[in-house]
Image (cartoon, grey):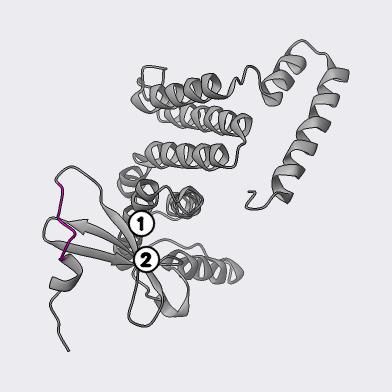
Amino acid sequence: MRQDIDGALKGWEHKPNVLQARIVTARDGRDVLQMRLDLGILQMELTDRPDGARPHGFATFYEYLKSKAKAASLAGKSFTLNDHQAQEADREFMQFYQRRICWLALGEYGRAVTDADHTLAFMDFVRDHSPSEAYTQAHEQYRGFVLFHRAQAEAAALAAEEDPEGAVNALRRGAETIREFLRGQDDEDAGEDNPMLAQLAVLENEIRERHGVKETLEEQLAQAVAREDYERAAELRDSIRQQTGRRTEAPGGA
């Protein structure tokens, strides 16, 4: 059997400073995700852990660590990551990052949201079971970036489903979550000049102008609550629930 990757590289030239990704069918018939690198190709599975491994029989290393923490809790003990577990956690963080940016490049926004949610949940776990403050901060510094990717992906998915109001709401919620995180980190760059917040604002304005979105129901609700118009607030909550229900029932709805 040939062991070189000449065939896979043929016709797929590397482009510096361009994230190149594609989905191809492997010899066994399964689809795999590939990222073009300067010296070759990085190949990932589409679901669960990108490298296809099942750590200790679990879909991801995060799921395995959760089982360890639960067992410790049931035994009345606390759980803290050891050095090996911390290193393996870092490997999984990197794998999900690489797959997430490929999903964004390919416009597979729902999959990007799923991978971002995995990373954020894993970051929460690491924060709660970290071996040191330095290890915690080494990961927390990237939380805003993951939240930024998630907000972009969710908004793009909703816009593709012809739900521009939902896309605007997703961008606004994402921006506020990032602000809260940055304030919690005492980050001086928590204002609208922050590059991530500025980019989300640009996307929001583009969607509003393209689709004629003025005030979303969520924005109207916030205003009604602020002026203590609770009757109007109740009406708006009903409308939001109905809107959410229609979105969930629609084909491909989130």
Part of the protein shown in magenta? 10-15
User: Can you name the residue that lies furthest to the right here?
Assistant: 231
Considering the image in quadrants, where does the N terminus appear? bottom left
Vertical side of 105 occupied by 214: above or below: above
Magenta: main secondary structure: loop
Q: Classify 10 Å Cα crowding around label 1: few (below 14), some (14-19), many (20 and above).
A: many
Residue 50 image label:
2
* Of the pair 235 and 177, the residue shown nearer to us: 235
- What amino acid is at disc 1? Arg
Q: Secondary structure at mark 2?
A: loop
Total tally of numbered discs in the picture: 2
Give the x, y percent position of residue 131. 36, 55
Give the x, y percent position of residue 123. 43, 50
Horizontal arrangement in the rendering, residue 250 relative to residue 10 (left or right): right
Q: Is residue 11 magenta?
A: yes
Splitting the image into 4 quarters, where does residue 220 fall? top right
Between the residue at mark 1 and the residue at mark 2, the CA separation in whole angstroms equals 7 Å
Q: Secondary structure at mark 1?
A: helix
- What amino acid is at disc 2? Pro
Splitting the image into 4 quarters, where does residue 170 fall? top right
Residue plotted at (67% across, 52% down): 251
Give the x, y percent position of residue 17. 17, 42
Vertical side of 30 occupied by 144: above or below: above
Residue 99 image label:
1
User: Can you name the residue that lies furthest to the front here?
Assistant: 11
